[in-house]
Image: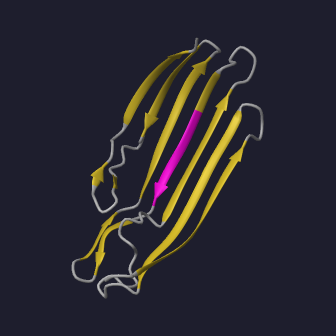
């Protein structure tokens, strides 16, 4: 239907804090209510396909020892969250919904002015999850990454 409308209302909040030397916290949350209005009757009032999950959240906390014998040693942990995602949504074919998920990640590292060595774990609980914007895309299982960086 030509000249159909979409309505989108939401909020996005982000927090960044360094409460003590070496400790950092970053967290975010987004909510988006997206609806079709005045369009094809099979779509009216339904969530817009391709608008993604209604709720998204993330948090990451890390600590790097700023001084002493362990200066440069650090750890971090975080989580990413997405609510269910409707990738097909009309009254003719119905809905196909990707389930919500939460992914846990962590790292341990040592860094100096000359180099950094780290070990990072993604999806530590080995959660089976999918993303997609009108598609279904399986995401990576648990994985470990080791990194070495040299600064010149």
* Quadrant of the rendering where the N terminus is positioned: bottom left
Vertical placement of residue 5 versus 12, above or below: below
Percent position of residue 74, x then y? 62, 26
Q: Count of labels shown?
A: 0
Residue drawn at x 38%, y 80% as measured from the top left: 46
On screen, residue 10 versus residue 138, left or right, reads: right
On screen, residue 87 versus residue 69, left or right, reads: left
Vertical placement of residue 50 versus 143, above or below: below
Residue drawn at x 50%, y 59% as measured from the top left: 56
Splitting the image into 4 quarters, where does residue 113 fall? top right
Q: How is the image coloured?
A: secondary structure
Bounds of the magenta segment: 76-82
Splitting the image into 4 quarters, where does residue 99 fall? bottom left
Which one is in front, 65 or 8?
Answer: 8
Q: Residue furthest front?
A: 2
Q: Is residue 93 within the magenta segment?
A: no
Characterize the magenta stretch by its predominant secondary structure: strand
Percent position of residue 119, x then y? 48, 25
Q: Residue furthest left?
A: 93
Percent position of residue 41, x then y? 31, 88
């Amino acid at each position: 239907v030509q000249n159909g409308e979409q309505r989108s209302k939401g909020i996005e909040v982000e927090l960044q804090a360094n409460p003590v030397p070496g400790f950092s916290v970053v967290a975010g949350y987004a909510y988006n209510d997206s609806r079709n209005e005045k369009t094809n009757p099979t779509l009216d009032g339904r969530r817009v396909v391709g608008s993604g999950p209604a709720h998204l959240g993330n948090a990451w906390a890390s600590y790097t020892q700023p001084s002493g014998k362990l200066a440069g040693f650090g750890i971090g942990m975080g989580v990413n969250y997405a609510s269910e995602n409707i990738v097909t949504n009309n009254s003719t074919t119905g809905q196909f919904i990707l389930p919500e998920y939460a992914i846990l990640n962590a790292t341990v590292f040592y860094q100096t002015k000359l180099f950094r060595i780290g070990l990072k774990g993604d999806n530590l609980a080995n959660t089976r999850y999918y993303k997609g914007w009108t598609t279904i895309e399986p995401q990576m299982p648990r994985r470990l990454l080791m990194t070495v960086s040299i600064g010149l």
